[in-house]
Image (cartoon, grey):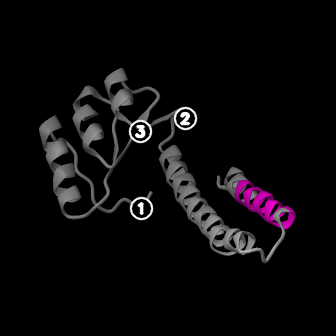
Amino acid sequence: MGISAWRSGLLPEEKAEAIDRLAAGGRKVLMVGDGLNDAAALARAHAAIAPGSAIEASQNAADLVLTQDSLMAVVEAITVARSARRRALENFGFAALYNLVAAPAAMIGLVNPFIAALAMSGSSLVVTLNALRLRGAR
Protein backbone atom coordinates (compact mmCIF):
# COMPACT_ATOMS: atom_id res chain seq x y z
CA MET A 1 0.00 0.00 0.00
CA GLY A 2 3.04 2.28 0.10
CA ILE A 3 2.82 3.14 3.79
CA SER A 4 6.26 4.34 4.86
CA ALA A 5 5.61 5.44 8.45
CA TRP A 6 3.45 3.54 10.91
CA ARG A 7 3.16 2.93 14.64
CA SER A 8 1.93 0.02 16.69
CA GLY A 9 1.28 -0.81 20.32
CA LEU A 10 -0.13 2.62 21.15
CA LEU A 11 -2.69 3.21 23.87
CA PRO A 12 -6.00 4.81 22.79
CA GLU A 13 -5.00 8.27 24.05
CA GLU A 14 -1.60 7.97 22.34
CA LYS A 15 -3.33 7.23 19.04
CA ALA A 16 -5.55 10.29 19.41
CA GLU A 17 -2.55 12.45 20.38
CA ALA A 18 -0.58 11.22 17.35
CA ILE A 19 -3.48 12.22 15.09
CA ASP A 20 -3.72 15.62 16.79
CA ARG A 21 0.03 16.21 16.25
CA LEU A 22 -0.20 15.32 12.58
CA ALA A 23 -3.31 17.50 12.13
CA ALA A 24 -1.59 20.42 13.90
CA GLY A 25 1.21 20.05 11.34
CA GLY A 26 -1.29 20.52 8.51
CA ARG A 27 -1.67 16.84 7.63
CA LYS A 28 -4.98 15.21 6.77
CA VAL A 29 -4.98 11.95 8.64
CA LEU A 30 -6.73 8.77 7.52
CA MET A 31 -7.23 6.36 10.41
CA VAL A 32 -8.14 2.72 9.88
CA GLY A 33 -9.17 0.84 13.00
CA ASP A 34 -11.43 -1.94 14.22
CA GLY A 35 -11.33 -2.04 18.01
CA LEU A 36 -12.76 -0.15 20.94
CA ASN A 37 -9.27 1.26 21.53
CA ASP A 38 -9.44 2.88 18.04
CA ALA A 39 -12.78 4.70 18.43
CA ALA A 40 -11.34 7.97 19.82
CA ALA A 41 -8.65 8.12 17.12
CA LEU A 42 -11.20 7.33 14.42
CA ALA A 43 -13.37 10.20 15.65
CA ARG A 44 -10.44 12.66 15.60
CA ALA A 45 -9.06 11.72 12.18
CA HIS A 46 -9.83 13.79 9.09
CA ALA A 47 -11.18 10.60 7.52
CA ALA A 48 -11.77 7.26 9.22
CA ILE A 49 -12.34 3.74 7.94
CA ALA A 50 -13.44 0.64 9.83
CA PRO A 51 -13.87 -2.87 8.47
CA GLY A 52 -17.31 -4.46 8.59
CA SER A 53 -15.98 -6.87 11.20
CA ALA A 54 -15.09 -3.99 13.57
CA ILE A 55 -16.96 -3.42 16.80
CA GLU A 56 -19.95 -1.11 16.62
CA ALA A 57 -18.20 1.80 18.37
CA SER A 58 -15.49 1.86 15.71
CA GLN A 59 -18.01 1.58 12.90
CA ASN A 60 -20.01 4.48 14.36
CA ALA A 61 -16.89 6.64 14.64
CA ALA A 62 -15.79 5.85 11.07
CA ASP A 63 -16.73 7.80 7.96
CA LEU A 64 -16.60 4.63 5.85
CA VAL A 65 -17.26 1.02 6.81
CA LEU A 66 -15.71 -1.55 4.47
CA THR A 67 -17.76 -4.48 3.29
CA GLN A 68 -14.73 -6.43 2.07
CA ASP A 69 -12.31 -8.30 4.30
CA SER A 70 -9.25 -7.07 2.40
CA LEU A 71 -7.38 -3.87 3.21
CA MET A 72 -7.13 -3.32 -0.55
CA ALA A 73 -10.61 -1.86 -0.16
CA VAL A 74 -8.90 1.10 1.56
CA VAL A 75 -6.86 1.73 -1.59
CA GLU A 76 -10.01 1.45 -3.70
CA ALA A 77 -11.86 3.88 -1.42
CA ILE A 78 -9.04 6.43 -1.73
CA THR A 79 -8.99 6.03 -5.52
CA VAL A 80 -12.75 6.54 -5.78
CA ALA A 81 -12.64 9.54 -3.40
CA ARG A 82 -9.91 11.23 -5.46
CA SER A 83 -11.85 10.60 -8.66
CA ALA A 84 -15.05 11.96 -7.08
CA ARG A 85 -13.20 15.12 -6.02
CA ARG A 86 -11.91 15.63 -9.58
CA ARG A 87 -15.39 15.16 -11.03
CA ALA A 88 -16.91 17.59 -8.51
CA LEU A 89 -14.32 20.26 -9.37
CA GLU A 90 -14.92 19.71 -13.08
CA ASN A 91 -18.67 20.02 -12.53
CA PHE A 92 -18.17 23.28 -10.62
CA GLY A 93 -16.17 24.51 -13.60
CA PHE A 94 -18.94 23.55 -16.06
CA ALA A 95 -21.56 25.25 -13.89
CA ALA A 96 -19.42 28.38 -13.49
CA LEU A 97 -18.85 28.56 -17.23
CA TYR A 98 -22.59 28.40 -17.88
CA ASN A 99 -23.35 30.98 -15.19
CA LEU A 100 -20.64 33.35 -16.40
CA VAL A 101 -21.42 33.09 -20.12
CA ALA A 102 -24.85 31.76 -21.02
CA ALA A 103 -26.95 33.23 -18.22
CA PRO A 104 -25.70 36.83 -18.66
CA ALA A 105 -26.03 36.50 -22.45
CA ALA A 106 -29.68 35.49 -22.01
CA MET A 107 -30.32 38.31 -19.53
CA ILE A 108 -29.05 41.03 -21.86
CA GLY A 109 -30.89 39.54 -24.84
CA LEU A 110 -27.97 38.15 -26.87
CA VAL A 111 -29.70 34.76 -27.06
CA ASN A 112 -33.39 34.03 -27.03
CA PRO A 113 -34.96 32.29 -24.02
CA PHE A 114 -35.35 28.99 -25.91
CA ILE A 115 -31.61 28.82 -26.64
CA ALA A 116 -30.83 29.76 -23.03
CA ALA A 117 -33.10 26.96 -21.79
CA LEU A 118 -31.37 24.50 -24.13
CA ALA A 119 -27.98 25.67 -22.84
CA MET A 120 -29.12 25.19 -19.27
CA SER A 121 -30.39 21.69 -20.03
CA GLY A 122 -27.17 20.92 -21.87
CA SER A 123 -25.13 22.15 -18.91
CA SER A 124 -27.10 19.88 -16.56
CA LEU A 125 -26.64 16.97 -18.93
CA VAL A 126 -22.87 17.54 -19.14
CA VAL A 127 -22.59 17.69 -15.35
CA THR A 128 -24.64 14.49 -14.95
CA LEU A 129 -22.69 12.59 -17.60
CA ASN A 130 -19.42 13.74 -16.09
CA ALA A 131 -20.52 12.50 -12.66
CA LEU A 132 -21.47 9.14 -14.18
CA ARG A 133 -17.84 8.69 -15.21
CA LEU A 134 -17.24 7.74 -11.55
CA ARG A 135 -18.76 4.34 -12.26
CA GLY A 136 -15.51 3.42 -14.01
CA ALA A 137 -13.25 4.76 -11.21
CA ARG A 138 -12.61 1.31 -9.79
- Where disc 2 sits, the SS reads loop
Q: CA distance from mark 2 to mark 1?
A: 20 Å
Where is residue 41 drawn, in percent x and y? 24, 40
At x 38%, y 36%, the residue is: 62
Residue 63 is tagged as 3
**Res 64 quadrant in image:** top left
Circle 1 or circle 3, nearest the eye: 3
Q: Quadrant of the N terminus?
A: bottom left
Report the span colored magenta.
114-128
In the rendered view, would you say 97 is above or below 34? below
Where is residue 29 drawn, in percent x and y? 31, 53
In the rendered view, would you say 91 is above or below 75? below
- Where disc 3 sits, the SS reads loop
Q: Name the amino acid type tagged 2.
A: Gln
Where is residue 110 drawn, in percent x and y? 78, 77
Which SS type dominates the magenta stretch?
A: helix
Locate residue 103 relative to residue 84 in the image: left or right.
right
Locate residue 92 relative to residue 78 in the image: left or right.
right
Locate residue 78 relative to residue 49 in the image: left or right.
right
Where is residue 123 drawn, in percent x and y? 74, 62
Q: CA distance from mark 1 to mark 3?
A: 22 Å
Locate residue 121 relative to residue 48 in the image: left or right.
right
Q: Which residue is mark 2?
A: 68
Residue 133 is tagged as none
Sooner in the amino-acid sequence: mark 1 or mark 3: 1
At x 54%, y 32%, the residue is: 67
Q: Name the amino acid type tagged 1.
A: Gly
Sooner in the amino-acid sequence: mark 3 or mark 2: 3
User: Extreme front residue here?
Assistant: 108
Sooner in the amino-acid sequence: mark 2 or mark 1: 1
Q: Which residue is mark 1?
A: 2
